[in-house]
Image (cartoon, helix red, strand yellow):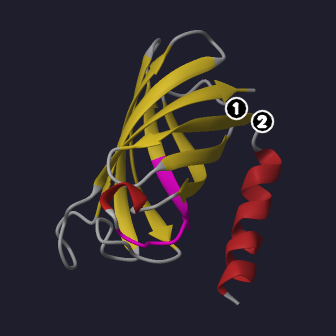
Amino acid sequence: MKILFVLLILFPVASYATNYQIGVGATERTGTIFMFSVEPDTNSSIVPRLDFGSINNAGKFHGFTDENFKFIGISAFWRGNRFEFGFGAIELNHQTQFLTSKYQFMTTLGFRITPRTQIEFRHISNGNTAGANFGDNLITLSLNF
């Protein structure tokens, strides 16, 4: 039921979006990350973004047995000529030793290398709202189209 609800909300947003982003990268604690983002085509300096991600090999670098996990999130980005800053919330499909609650905050600092490529540094944590607050740091290289 929850997936159907999310799809009903996201379908209209994605159908109006004309900017898409695919990213691949690594995380500090848990493994590799693959991301897909959708945002509207706008000249505004504040832009909403939907993020979908998959983090693989979660925890194997530290001898833990966490499975791969997925997340979905929404963020607001302030965008300058070369830099961008974003803040938002994500929902994980399950917790890990480092991401200890289902709902997390995500902050992003991005640098646009070319009009179509950018590098982003992200931090995900629960903001000390539930359980331990270890969090994770990510770096992604993204292609915009």
Figure check: 51 above or below 64 = above
Dividing the picture into quadrants, the one containing residue 8 is bottom right
* Residue depicted at 39% across the width and 72% down the height: 103
Specify whether 91 is left or right of 143: left
Relative to 47, does residue 32 appear above or below in the rendering? Answer: below
Q: Earlier in the sequence, mark 1 or mark 2?
A: 2
Front-most of residues 143 and 73: 143
Residue at left offset 75%, top offset 26%: 145
Q: Residue flagged by tag 1: what amino acid is it? A: Asp
For badge 2, the amino acid type reads Thr
Instruction: Locate the N terminus and report the quarter of the image it occupies.
Output: bottom right
Helix, strand or loop at label 1? It is loop
What x and y, as percent, mark residue 131? 20, 79
Magenta run includes residue 66: yes
What residue is shown at x 52% (from left), y 59% (from top)? 73
Residue 62: % across, % down: 31, 59
Classify residue 79 as left or right of residue 12. Answer: left
Residue bearing mark 1: 41
Residue at left offset 67%, top offset 37%:
22
| CB atoms of marks 1 and 2 within 8 Å | yes
Q: Which residues are magenta?
A: 64-75
Which image quadrant is residue 138 in?
top left
Q: Which residue is mark 2?
A: 18
Percent coordinates x, y for residue 42 in the rendering: 65, 30
Callout 1: few (<14), some (14-19), or many (20+) C-alpha neighbours within 10 Å? Answer: few
Residue 123 magenta-highlighted: no
Q: Which mark, by number, is residue 92?
A: none
User: Measured from the top left, where is residue 133 in percent x and y?
Assistant: 19, 66
